[in-house]
Image (cartoon, helix red, strand yellow):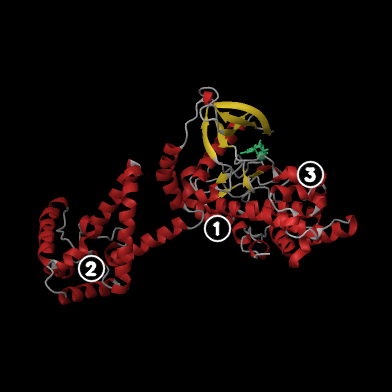
C-alpha cells in the first residue's frame, strides 16, 4: 500500500472516531507536515493499557495530556501519544485484536525471565532499539513513506530469516539467557568429588572411566583428555556441545546425561567431563560384534523372540531389532540437527545402551552451525569408516566465515550446504551393519576395505553395490527386504552420494517419516 493511502485512511478513521483527545493533533501532523506523522507512543500504551483507555475517556485524556506535555522536552518534534491501534489503520479488528492480545500475553509471560536473566548488554540494545523506533514514529527502517505497517513487515522478514534453520535467534536466546540459567544449574565438581574407577573405553584423544561421586555415592562416567595434540580442543568442544544439548531437554534425553566438569590440575587446557552412569555401558559396536547377534541385542532391549513369536525367521528378527535401534537413534540425531548441531562421528561405538535404549555419546567432533563452534571446513579428524564420501560437512570450497559472521550467515550456509546430511550417511551405514552380516566384519568397513572400494567403484549407488556383492560375494540382504523392503529403501536413501547441489541424500529428520520408522509394524 502507498503512503498516501495510509495517511488518508488514518485521517478518515480519526475523524470518524468520537472524542479522542489527540484527534486534532493527528490531523494536524498528517496534513501540515510534509513528512509522515511521527507519533510517539507511550511505552505503557504498548504494554497493554489500551483497552482501559478506550473505555474510560477521562483517564485516557489525562494520560494523553501528561505525555503530551512531557515528551516534547525529550524529542525535537512535537510528540503526542497515539494508540497502537492507530499505527495499523488498515489491519481489520478481527486480525488486530487476537494478535494484540497474543503479543501482550507473550510479553507478560516472558518479562520476568527477561528481567532476571537477560544480560545487561542485551537489555541495553533492546531498549536503545525501542527508543530509536519510538523516536522515529515506528518507521526507523521503513522511512516516512512506509509507516508502522511496513516497519513491522521488515521486522517480520528479519525474524523469519533469524528463525530459519539452524536458527540464529534461538541461538541468541540460548547463548545468553539459557546459557546463564544452565551454568547456574550445573553441578560444580571439585577434583576430590570424583573417585575414578575402571576404564570404560579409550580413544586417541582421551580415556573414559567409571567413577563415583565421593559426596553422594552416585555412579558417574568421566572423560579425561590424554594430552595428545588436539585433545584439549576436542574436549573443550565436547564440553560446549554437551552443555548446549543439556539445555535442549528433548534432545538431551537421547544423549548421555551431562552433569558438569572439573579440572584435574589448575589451569589445564581443558576440563574433565562428567556424566551420570546410566544403567549400562555396552556400545552398539559390542552387540554388532557379538557371536550371539541378534539374540544378545534382543535380550538387552527386552525384545526376546519369545515375546513376539519364537517362530520368527532370522531375517524378521534382525529387521525388528534394526528398526528398534533406528527408532532410538534417528529422533536424537534429528533433534541435534534441529538445534543446529551436526554430530559428525556417528558410529556404533558412540551409541551406548543405557537402560532399554541407545543413547548418543561423544560430541568431540560435533559442530554447532549456529555459532560456528568447532566448525572447521578442513578439519579431518573424523572416523573415515563412517564418513560420507564428501568427507567434510560442507564443500571444501566453502570458506570458514569469521566467528561473528558465522551466526549471521548460518541460515544461508545451512540452506545452501545442507551440512546435516553428513550424519545421514553414517546413520545409513549403521542400518546396513545391523541388517547385513558381512557389513559387520571390521575388515569390510575399514578405510580402504571392501565397502569403501566397491562403493566408490559403484559411484555410491547402493543398488549397484548390492547387486554386485550379492552376486559375486553372496552377501545377505534378506533382513532388509522383510515387510515390503522398507529397511532397504531407507538405507538406499541415506547411503548415497550428494548431487552437485549438495542434495539427494535423505535428511535424518525426514527419515523419521519413512515407513520403516513411522509404520507401526
Ligand atoms: N556415558 C557413558 N556411559 C557408558 N560408557 C561410556 C559413556 N561414555 C563413554 N563410554 C565408553 O567410553 C568409550 C569412549 O567414549 P567416547 O566418548 O566415545 O570417547 P572417544 O572420543 O575416545 O571415542 C565409549 O565407546 C564407551 O564404551
Ligand atoms: Mg567415541
Instruction: Choose between 322 and 162: the one closer to the eye.
Output: 322
Q: Pointer 2: what residue?
A: 86
Closer mark to the observer between disc 2 and disc 1: 2
Is residue 141 visible in this depiction of the protein? no
Locate residue 378, reporting x and y percent.
63, 43
Q: Earlier in the sequence, mark 3 or mark 1?
A: 3
Q: Is mark 1 within 8 Å of ligand 2?
A: no
Instruction: Choose between 337 and 127: the one closer to the eye.
Output: 337
The residue lying at 34 percent from left, 52 percent from top is 110
Q: Residue furthest right?
A: 472
Disc 3 residue crowd, few under 14, some 14–19, many 20+, Cα 10 Å? some
Instruction: Choose between 82 and 380: the one closer to the eye.
Output: 82
Disc 2 residue crowd, few under 14, some 14–19, many 20+, Cα 10 Å? some
Q: Regarding mark 1 in the picture, which secondary structure is present there?
A: helix
Q: Pointer 3: what residue?
A: 290
Q: Pointer 1: what residue?
A: 415
Side (left or right) of 457 relative to 393 = right
160 w.r.t. 88: above or below: above
Q: CA distance from mark 3 to mark 1?
A: 41 Å
Q: Regarding mark 2 in the picture, which secondary structure is present there?
A: helix
Locate residue 232, reporting x and y percent.
58, 31
Side (left or right) of 248 relative to 202 = left
The residue lying at 86 percent from left, 59 percent from top is 470
Quadrant, the C terminus:
bottom right
Amino acid at each position: 500500500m502507498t503512503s498516501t493511502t495510509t495517511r488518508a485512511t488514518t485521517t478518515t478513521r480519526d475523524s470518524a472516531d468520537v472524542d479522542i483527545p489527540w484527534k486534532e493533533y493527528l490531523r494536524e501532523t498528517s496534513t501540515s507536515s510534509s513528512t509522515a506523522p511521527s507519533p510517539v507512543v507511550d511505552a505503557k500504551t504498548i504494554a497493554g493499557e489500551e483497552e482501559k483507555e478506550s473505555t474510560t475517556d477521562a483517564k485516557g485524556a489525562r494520560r494523553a495530556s501528561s505525555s503530551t506535555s512531557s515528551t516534547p522536552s525529550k524529542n525535537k518534534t512535537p510528540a503526542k501519544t497515539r494508540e497502537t491501534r492507530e499505527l495499523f489503520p488498515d489491519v481489520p479488528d478481527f486480525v488486530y485484536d487476537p494478535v494484540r492480545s497474543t503479543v501482550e500475553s507473550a510479553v507478560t509471560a516472558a518479562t520476568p525471565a527477561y528481567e532476571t536473566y537477560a544480560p545487561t548488554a542485551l537489555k541495553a540494545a533492546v531498549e536503545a532499539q525501542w527508543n530509536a523506533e519510538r523516536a522515529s514514529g515506528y518507521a526507523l527502517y521503513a522511512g516516512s513513506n512506509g509507516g508502522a505497517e511496513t516497519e513491522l513487515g521488515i521486522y517480520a522478514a528479519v525474524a523469519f530469516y533469524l528463525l530459519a534453520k539452524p536458527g540464529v535467534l534461538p541461538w541468541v536466546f540460548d547463548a545468553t539467557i539459557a546459557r546463564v540459567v544452565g551454568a547456574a544449574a550445573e553441578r560444580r565438581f571439585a577434583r576430590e568429588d570424583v573417585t575414578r574407577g575402571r576404564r570404560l573405553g579409550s580413544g586417541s584423544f582421551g580415556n573414559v572411566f567409571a567413577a563415583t561421586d565421593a559426596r553422594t555415592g552416585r555412579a558417574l562416567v568421566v572423560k579425561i583428555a590424554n594430552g595428545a595434540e588436539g585433545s584439549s580442543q576436542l574436549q573443550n568442544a565436547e564440553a560446549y556441545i554437551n552443555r548446549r544439548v543439556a539445555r535442549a531437554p528433548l534432545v538431551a534425553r537421547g544423549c548421555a546425561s551431562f552433569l558438569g566438569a572439573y579440572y584435574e590440575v589448575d589451569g589445564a587446557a581443558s576440563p574433565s567431563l562428567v556424566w551420570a552412569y546410566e544403567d549400562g555401558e555396552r556400545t552398539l559396536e559390542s552387540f554388532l560384534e557379538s557371536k550371539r547377534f541378534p539374540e544378545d541385542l534382543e535380550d538387552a532391549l527386552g525384545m526376546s523372540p519369545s515375546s513376539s513369536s519364537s517362530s520368527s525367521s532370522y531375517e524378521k528378527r534382525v529387521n525388528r531389532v534394526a528398526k528398534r535401534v533406528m527408532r532410538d537413534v534417528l529422533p536424537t540425531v534429528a533433534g541435534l540437527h534441529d538445534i543446529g548441531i551436526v554430530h559428525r562421528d556417528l558410529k556404533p561405538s558412540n551409541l551406548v545402551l543405557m537402560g532399554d535404549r541407545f543413547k548418543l555419546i561423544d560430541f568431540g567432533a560435533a559442530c554447532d552451525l549456529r555459532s560456528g563452534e568447532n566448525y572447521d571446513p578442513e578439519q579431518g579428524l573424523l572416523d573415515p569408516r563412517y564418513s560420507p564420501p564428501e568427507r567434510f560437512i560442507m564443500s571444501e570450497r566453502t570458506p570458514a566465515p569469521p566467528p561473528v559472521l558465522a551466526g549471521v550467515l548460518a541460515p544461508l550456509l545451512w540452506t545452501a550446504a545442507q551440512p546435516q546430511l553428513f550424519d545421514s550417511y553414517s546413520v545409513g551405514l549403521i542400518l546396513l551393519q545391523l541388517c547385513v552380516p558381512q557389513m559387520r566384519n571390521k575388515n569390510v568397513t575399514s578405510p580402504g576395505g571392501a565397502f569403501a572400494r566397491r562403493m566408490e567403484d559403484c559411484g555410491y549407488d547402493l543398488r549397484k553395490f548390492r547387486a554386485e556383492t550379492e552376486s559375486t560375494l553372496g552377501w545377505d540382504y534378506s533382513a532388509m527386504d522383510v515387510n515390503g523392503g522398507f529397511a532397504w529403501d531407507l538405507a538406499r536413501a541415506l547411503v548415497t552420494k550428494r548431487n552437485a547441489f549438495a542434495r539427494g541424500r535423505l535428511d535424518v529428520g525426514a527419515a523419521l517419516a519413512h515407513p520403516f520408522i513411522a509404520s507401526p509394524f
